[in-house]
Image (cartoon, rainbow, N blue to C red):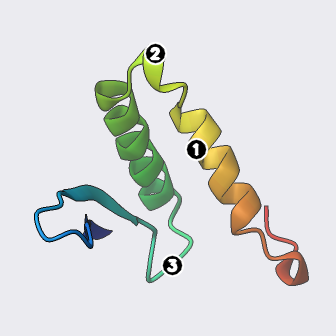
Amino acid sequence: SDVRIFLVKSAEKDGGAVAWFGGGSDLTPYYLVDQDIIDFHTHLKKMCDDHLSDDDNLSYRQMKRSCDEYFYLPARSEE
């Protein structure tokens, strides 16, 4: 996992700050072990189910689809 906290402070002398967490996770080093892949996605889906609300307009399925599209490498014809 790669988790970071981002902190942006106002340029004003007494200005406030905004902070949020960001980052990601992946299967590296990547070896084709089916059970590792199943466990990884099962855990991520459970975290989404436990922490996202219907008001967030997000789901594990939507975020996985976005990641799959973003990280697709046409030269490797990955699916």
Q: Nearer the viewer, mark 3 or mark 2?
A: 2
* Residue at 45% from the left image edge and 17% from the top image edge: 55
Q: Give the labeled residue for mark 2.
A: 54
Q: Quadrant of the C terminus?
A: bottom right
Residue 78 on image: x %, y %: 80, 69
- Residue located beneath label 1 in the image: 63
**Residue positioned most to the front:** 13
Q: Earlier in the sequence, mark 3 or mark 1?
A: 3
Picture quadrant where residue 77 is located: bottom right
Horizontally, residue 42 falls left or right of residue 19, namely right
Quick check: can you spot residue 1? no
Quarter placement of the N terminus: bottom left
Which residue is identified by label 3? Answer: 30
Question: Callout 2: helix, strand or loop?
Answer: helix
Calculate the distance from the C-alpha at mark 3 to the C-alpha at mark 1: 20 Å
Tell which tag, 3 or 1, sits nearer the viewer. 1
Residue at mark 3 to residue at mark 2: CA–CA distance: 33 Å
* Residue 23 horizontal side relative to residue 78, left or right: left
Q: For the point 52% across and 78% down, which residue is it?
A: 31
Image position, residue 18 (x, y; %): 25, 56
Spatial separation of the CA atoms under disc 1 and disc 2: 14 Å
The reply to whether residue 48 is in sight is yes
Q: Earlier in the sequence, mark 3 or mark 2?
A: 3
